[in-house]
Amino acid sequence: MTIRIHIGLDDTDSTRGGCTTYIAALLVERLETLGANFNDYPSLVRLNPNVPWKTRGNGALCLRIDCDETLEGKAKESVVALVEELSDLAFKGTDPGIVFLSKPEVPEEIKAFTQNAITGIATLKEATRLIRKFGGEALGFNTCRGIIGALAAVGETFDGDHTYEVIAYRTPEHIGTKRRVDRASIFEMDRATQPFTFNNVDQEKQRVIITPRGPDPILFGVRGETPEIVKKAFGLIKPLEKVERWVIFRTNQGTDAHLKRAATLSELEHYTSIIARGVVSRNPWVVPLRHVLFSIRDASGEVDCAAYEPTGSLRKIAKELAVGDVVEVYGAVRMPSGGKALTVNLEKINVLSLASKETYQNPVCRECGKRLESMGKGQGFRCKKCGTRFENAVKAKIAEERKLKTGLYVTSPRSQRHLTKPLWRYGLEKEGLEAKAMLRNWHS
């Protein structure tokens, strides 16, 4: 009998090395060697980016295989052995988790658990309850926190929007050294695959952003709309060091899956990412290091919003806001260090309407046409040139033309989270899995 096994993995890496996607890439080959067939691309699921105990990108993995039931034991043994071998178990905060679920379909309760893990805080207690309820198996190391992400990866079946990423891995001797990829080929690839790949380069700073900087085995990763386009992009890039292997993943990156709409500002919670509407209640101000803050208010309360210096162009947009503007803010809800109130760390600003902005000018002298000067509060004006006094004159109200326009503004690519949907993805969203076969060569 053929059975389907969903294999979830999480939290095998640390800040000093390792990568859960790399373990997944190795498992693809080992499981195929055993005789397993993959019924989908490996899932790379980015979970809530605001949880304080994440390692880097807070990504969990799921492999979905069909195999003869006599191979189930060997398949599970292979997974456990590789996770034990490659996880940084001695590092504090590395708490790997593995989940096996042998079912044709993923239960709706597990799918709901996944959505909570992406937008909020999921617990190990709830994860283990669901694993027991639906006859799954779990193995955890150290604090076992990785079981949460592993189950969440199993529960992400991409019933809505999703994207793809091809990841190329380095050979062991290069790990820890500067990544060597032909820079010009990346810019050329970006031009050749627009708008169907995203976040390859930051045009504002002319910076390549597909190559990570940490001590992990990833050489580069390209994200896009289809398996075909990311594979094409992979072929256009010229690595200057040997690629050990590569794999195409299905992922929730670039979909805004982490954002949850808040009906009122009073609903905002620490560690969540939200979309909230309000009226600008305090004009923007600049704090050290060029961060721009402003406040918004609704009937339930008020909250500060921060566009930090790395957000680039978004910081400039925030600076142009004025009291009375109606906006939607997108971003992470945080409690600043030593603070007493929540702050929204901005990813996007949707300017819905602009308030009229007015300034006042001293009146003009009727005798000589020069601008008058004030003689003091309530004392009128006088002309410095001809000396004429105007006791009853008042300042003139001038409507100021706003540089800012209504519309959606997104942080610069270099500072976008894995889950942030770029502007050019609007209109390209998917509504579930496409009914077509996997590429023949989706890994090597």
Image (cartoon, grey):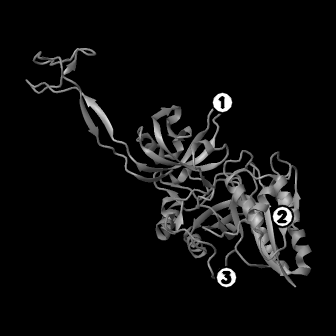
Between the residue at mark 2 and the residue at mark 3, the CA separation in whole angstroms equals: 27 Å
Between the residue at mark 3 and the residue at mark 1, the CA separation in whole angstroms equals: 54 Å
Task: State the residue position of label 1.
Answer: 338
Residue type for callout 3: Arg
> Quick check: 304 left or right of 443?
left
Residue type for callout 2: Val
> Quick check: 92 left or right of 244?
right
Does the residue at mark 2 contact the one at mark 1 (Cβ under 8 Å)? Answer: no
Task: State the residue position of label 3.
Answer: 440
Q: Judge the density around disc 2: few (<14), some (14-19), many (≥20) Cα neighbours within 10 Å.
A: many
Residue type for callout 1: Gly
Q: Nearer the viewer, mark 3 or mark 1?
A: 1
Quadrant, the N terminus: bottom right
Q: Position of residue 12 (x, y in %)?
A: 79, 56
Residue 99's disc number: 2
Q: Position of residue 61 (x, y in %)?
A: 74, 63
SS of the residue at dot 3?
loop
> Quick check: 191 left or right of 372?
right
Residue 73's quadrant in the figure? bottom right
